[in-house]
Image (tube, rainbow, N blue to C red):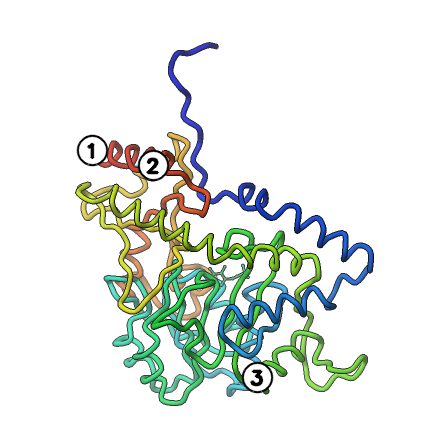
Amino acid sequence: MSTDQPVDEPVPLVDLKAAHAEVEAEVRAGFDRVLATGGYVKGPETAGFEAEYAAFSGARHCVGAANGTDALELALRALDLPPGGGVVLPANTFVATAEAVVRAGLRPVLVDADPDHLLIDPERVADALPGAVALLPVHLNGQLAPMGPLLELAAGRPVVEDAAQSQGARQHGRALHGLVSATSFYPGKNLGAYGDAGAVVTDDDALAAAVRLIGDHGSGRKYEHERFGFNSRMDALQAVVLRAKLRRLPAWNEARRAAAERYHRLLAGIDGLTPPRTAPGNEHVWHLYAVRIGPGRDRDAVLAALQAAGIGAGVHYPVPVHLQPAFRQLGHGAGAFPVAERAARELLTLPLHPHITAAQQERVVETLAEALAA
Ligand SMILES: *Cc1c(COP(=O)(O)O)cnc(C)c1O
């Protein structure tokens, strides 16, 4: 079939192929180095990445892990908290945050988000703190939770940061604010591996050593197992990819910021949506650009219209943790966390990645405006 109409290319939510094209030569050379030695687990590539990511994070230590959920679990286990102790985390997060708490033998204590930025709300944290043994704020969508107020409220309890969505983000110039942070290098994150990987970042020497021990079968010396552990290590091939991509990350985050600014401009004056906001003191890295649709609009109809037009919009996340069947045992019904529930109904993530073009963004916004006017 021939047509005079130009066919609009799809606009993907993320573009991992474009990112790969930039690092391909380095990645292939690095893979060759590893294949030549046969050292696939631990070794110099992983150690090299750990040192480079620690420096990038302004922290003393980075310990690689098999994925981000494990990294959170390792950080929590290394703290030796009392079994069954409450860990305060937001209800509006990816389910992994809560999974890690349960897997570490602790109890998730969910709290609601602040309605303006959808970050964990310090006022709600204050209500949940009695009885809690740790705080687990999530740096959602690429900006840090309000760490000043949270550290004050924590009053000495350890603060573990879920930094899976915030690689390169800063607040008042700093990335790490709590005792320890855990991140994920799932392919779609700002710094993504070619498979699963994660890391724990901390300034605390003893904690870093404990994380390394637990993630390597509790063993510092071959066949000596000092403490109960499991297997969660970053492999050498993932480290090769992450080293090549880390060199580009500042420029890629800058490109994300420019794309977010462009969305802000293009979306200004469009009825029926609210663009995302950056909280004071934050240098945002725009892991996700999520607008709120409504009130009085049908987010799912808008999502369907964008997808029908080939635009890879998404929803992060359609069901908050407390309403997931897997977390029924926490005993919260609908209405327990109204801000999180409203966010789940209203949020719509627009395509944003370092290689998105102005023309692609214009097409997204035109399609979105049409869908809202329909
Ligand atoms: C991706 C993610 C994780 C988990 O990371 P995995 O590497 O997929 O295990 C944890 N928390 C948040 C907020 C995430 O976005």
**304 shown above or below 258:** above
Numbered disc 3: secondary structure: helix
The label on residue 15 is none
* Real-space Cα separation, disc 1 to disc 2, in angstroms: 14 Å
- Residue 248 position, x and y percent, is 53, 54
State the residue position of label 1: 373
The crowd level at tag 2 (other Cα within 10 Å; few <14, some 14-19, many 20+) is many
Q: Position of residue 261 (x, y in %)?
A: 30, 49
- Please state the horizontal and vertical placement of residue 8, each as a whole percent of the image: 40, 26
SS assignment at label 2:
helix
Q: Is 112 situated above or below 354?
A: below
Taking depth in this image into account, of 56 and 291 the one nearest to the observer is 56
Label 3 is placed on what type of residue?
Leu
Do the residues under discs 3 and 2 have CB atoms within 8 angstroms? no
Q: 241 left or right of 56?
A: right
Q: Which residue is mark 3?
A: 207
Determine the residue located farthest toward the top in the rendered image: 2
Mark 1 vs 2, N-terminal side: 2
Q: Which residue is mark 2?
A: 364
C-beta proximity under 8 Å, tags 1 and 2: no
Q: Of marks 3 and 2, which one's residue comes earlier in the chain?
A: 3
Which image quarter is the C terminus in? top left
Disc 1 or disc 2, which is closer to the eye?
2
Residue sitting nearer the eye, 135 or 337: 135
Q: Seen from this angle, which residue lies furthest bottom?
A: 156
Between discs 3 and 1, the one toward the N terminus:
3
Q: Amino acid at mark 1?
A: Ala
- How far across and down, in percent of the image, does residue 283 sit? 35, 63
Residue at screen point 42% across, 87% down: 157
